[in-house]
Image (spheres, rainbow, N blue to C red):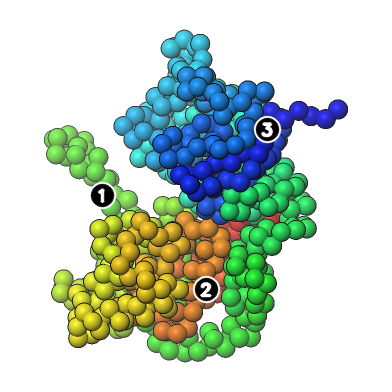
Amino acid sequence: MKQEPILSIKDLSISFGNNKVIHNISYNLYENEILGIVGESGSGKSVSSMAILGLLPKKISKITSGSISYNDIDLTILSSKAFQNIRGNKIAMIFQEPMSSLNPSMTCGKQVQEILFQHTNLFKSEIKDEVISLFEKVKLPTPERVFKAYPHEISGGQKQRVMIAMAIACKPDILIADEPTTALDVTVQKDIIKLLKSLQTDTKMSVIFITHDLALISEIADRVLVMYKGDIVEEGDVTTIFKAPQHNYTKALINSRPSLETRLKTLPTIQDYLDNSISKEIITSQQRKLQHENIYNKPPLLEVVNVEKEYFSKSGWFSLRLGSAQAKPKTFKAVNKVSFKLYEGETLGLVGESGCGKSTLGNAILQLDIATAGQIVYKGRDITKLSKTEVKTLRKEIQIIFQDPYSSLNPRIPVGQAILEPMRVHKLFNSDEERKEKVIEILNRVGLSEDYFNRYPHEFSGGQRQRIGIARTIALQPKLIVCDESVSALDISVQAQVLNLLNELKEDFGFTYIFISHDLAVVKYMSDQLLVMNKGQIEELDDADIIYSNPKKEYTKKLIHAIPKGL
């Protein structure tokens, strides 16, 4: 007997104003299954899922055709009041960014309690026990502590577990997980995937798991839908989709991610697949060896010697201010006796879980956060001893590409001016006319046209904004660039474009990179040497290929083992 779907979407179309973003899509979700929906930003995967929960913005969007049936109830015609009984109770959602989804002014425990007050008949005395039980179920360490903690007092992975506890609190029939692991470390991501699978096995709930990462989908889903520009272009069980993808877009999603086995000279993008213009040229181990001989025969550009960065706990400071006799300021070493050398033309990969000290180390090198001890020697000079004026001059030589280009650009300044401004500060070129010419040249170099000069940051996509961030960095013709999680928020194909661009610029301008990321596949592809950090210290330092093929430390093995491999 054929199984009846718990959720059925038929000929669904959604428009934002006159722009149709979802085109007559149909699919079913069955009981006790995990359905993966995969596609890039703008493919329609999140919009179609928001429609299931009645969360589309009312004034600017509308469902123009089709139906969404949950147990024979058409959700598209449901009143707001009727939806309140379903949303969070029968159909729940885990959002992509837990920090913006949790209320910062309420404790984690209270936020989960609210759901239970709303949807269950439990007594007040029973509700706290139920929340603690949920926190145990999602494997939160010290549930009692998390119950009393505010969101900012726990880690990203723990916040996501609180969100999952909230979503499963009422034992929903359907759980929608929208990019629930995108911003998480690879090891935390693996834990969350494992947790969701075990919860689904225990509760038999149906799960829609949304992501842009097909390798990740392979580790959790039973069936997969591939979405592209508002259409479902491919559908099937996870093995078929991976072993024999039919659509070029699916093939591109599988192959745009850097391989751990082969180092392609240029990563294929979605457009390469759609145009059938893929370059299969690889960098051989012999070419890599010759390249390294050339890099490491010169004196180092940067030498980090026994660098430490220590922070004092604020709670200890406040206790002292209040005159507590027992209080002592607590210290925390974010970076502890780190030493390494960086050579001109090299890309040094810096990896480790959140809190390992990699960004703190990057900020110390940039002189954005002054090291507590040790030396940072750039071109033979200890830059920790520079005056403010000398540090300002150094800024031209050592630059950063930020993780979130939108928050690093001034929304009131056109992007052309944002790129031109640091040139003016550092007195590069003789006039603003000359500088503007150079900015247009740089915009073209990063794949953007002259027409973009007078546009504002909000008018660009995430990938375009990252190119603008890169353009602003290279405008000063620096020697050393710190890339701090600079591709972690990008779709896989856009990520491929940006990584290709960084490698081209390195070749053309002789840049040296410190490449910080929690995505180990990306770091391996980009890096010459790899530095693995754990709890503020260097765990392992060697050629990137040697570390990946033969990691010596258990911590490194754990990181590599956690990378989603696909089938």
> x, y percentage for residue 30?
71, 32
The disc labelled 2 sits on which kind of residue?
A: Asn
Residue 221 against residue 385 in the figure, above or below: above
Say which of 543 and 278 sits in front.
278
Q: Residue at x 39, y 24 (%)?
A: 110
Give the structural element (helix, strand or loop) at label 2.
helix
- Residue 233 seen in this snapshot: yes
> x, y percentage for residue 563?
60, 56
The disc labelled 1 sits on which kind of residue?
A: Phe
User: In this figure, which residue is indicated by the disc labeled 3?
Assistant: 8
Q: Residue at x 14, y 39 (%)?
A: 321
Give the structural element (helix, strand or loop) at label 1.
strand
For marks 3 and 1 on the same chain, the one whose residue lies earlier in the sequence:
3
Q: Nearer the viewer, mark 2 or mark 3?
A: 3
User: In this figure, which residue is indicated by the disc labeled 2?
Assistant: 500
User: In this figure, which residue is indicated by the disc labeled 1?
Assistant: 312
Q: Residue at x 71, y 59 (%)?
A: 247
Q: Nearer the viewer, mark 2 or mark 1?
A: 2
Q: Is residue 188 left or right of residue 236?
A: left
Q: CA distance from mark 2 to mark 1?
A: 41 Å
